[in-house]
Image (spheres, rainbow, N blue to C red):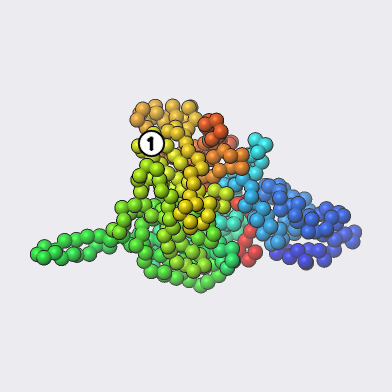
Amino acid sequence: MEETTMKESRLLIFEGGQSADNMTMPGLPQEVVVNILSRLPFTSLLSLKLVCRPWRILIHDPFLISKHLDEAAGNDPSFILESNWPIPDQRYFIDFFDNSEGKVTSKKLPAINSSTNPMCLIDSCNGLLCMHDSSRRIFICNPFTGLYIELPKLVKYPSLVGHLVFGFHQTTKEYKIIQIVFRRQLRKVYSSTIPTSTSSTLSEVQIFTIGSPCWRNLGTIPYRFILSKPKALVHGRFHWLSTPNKNTTATLLISFDLDTERFREIPKPDCCCGSDKCFRQLMVVRGCLSAIAFHDNYGERLEIWIMKEYSVKESWIKEFSIGAYCLPPTLMQQEIIQFSAYFRPNRFVRFLCVLKSGEILLEFKRKALVVYDPRDGTFKEFTFPEMPNRFKIVIHVGSLNWLHN
């Protein structure tokens, strides 16, 4: 019944002769009702689902789910925060929808009942999570509905889960998972008399399209991505930073097109410090590809560069700059006491997003969230009840979306 389409829900007749339209918001056309509901916070939709059967049918309607995902793109983001220590399988949903009014919603999520070992968070896309367990099995699930599927086992390196990313292409309407396994290849090089060994950097790429029977091998690429940093998905393309290889001493910006399944280099901004290795992280700001630069020799400053026109080098602009201390004084003092006065906090800061208020949400060492206000240069720690001491956090749109939608 949850999969009833909007057209079908209009025809349902309930006791007393009332249609589903009249049972939800009497007197309003269904299109208006859907438009109103699509603008609500996701936690409000979850509450409305409990009102009655017609509301439950409507809240699960694929058209409303899709429209709600579209509307969410213009709102402040929400997140999934996961902790597996000291208690495994702890996950929280954090929603900044009402942040403009000083309200942030946090909700503890139930454990995903997969009849397997505790699962670990990998990536998020359109309200769905990509996860794996200790047996190297990979799953796609919705943390709010409890629905999940297990992906086919990898044909190559079945016991190894490499770097995984999960994305959706808006044009092809396909969900894809990409696995990248780094391999160092040794080979002998003979000079005039003495053989020597050298190594080359190769990454093997495998891809799985949801709905297909098996993984496909795309071969190897001459890059080694900085896997500790998150990817950025812009214009149907994943983006990573790559460590220098035999052809360059610079950090490279590499994209992968989910449609054509091809890699290519994207131009980076020209950094003022003269270093080709200052860029440490990628993110998405207002729909644009953005890069984070860290400067050792400029007072440990952090900068956010934004590519206003995709793939145009000249369109990179520096939009934000943060000084040497990205922590509130109380948190900074704790770190100095624990690690010494020479502690350099900016090395451990990760940018999460720029809020509609203009504030910037930062993560520090997987144990603190910090809100920075560039207007007055102030920092404040963000916390919520039951917030764990150690965690992993990803941007996640709250949704009842599922793969058949």
**Residue at 52% across, 38% down:** 369
The answer to whether residue 350 is above or below residue 244 is: above
**Residue at 71% across, 48% down:** 40
Image position of 25 (left or right of 320): right
Q: Where residue 404 appears, x then y in whole percent?
A: 63, 66
Q: Can residue 161 be seen in this view?
A: no
Q: Where residue 164 appears, x then y in whole percent?
A: 45, 58
Q: Quadrant of residue 345?
A: top left
Image position of 374 (left or right of 217): right
Work out which residue is located at the far right of the displayed protein and give it. 16
Work out which residue is located at the far left of the displayed protein and give it. 193
Q: Quadrant of residue 403?
A: bottom right
Work out which residue is located at the far front of the displayed protein and give it. 314
Where is mark 1, residue-wise? 298
Q: Mark 1 is on which residue type?
A: Tyr
Q: In which quarter of the image is residue 242?
A: bottom left
Q: Can residue 77 be seen in this view?
A: yes
Quadrant where the N terminus lies?
bottom right
**Residue at 33% across, 54% down:** 244
57 vs 63, nearest the viewer:
63
Quadrant where the C terminus lies?
bottom right
**Residue at 42% across, 37% down:** 301
Image position of 196 (left or right of 128): left
Q: Where residue 78 appears, x then y in whole percent?
A: 59, 47
278 vs 173, nearest the viewer:
278
389 vs 367, nearest the viewer:
367
Q: What element carries label 1?
A: loop
Work out which residue is located at the far bottom of the displayed protein and give it. 213
Q: Where residue 208 appears, x then y in whole percent?
A: 49, 67
Q: How crowded is mark 1: few (under 14 residues within 10 Å), some or many (20 or more)?
A: few
Image position of 213 (left or right of 144): left
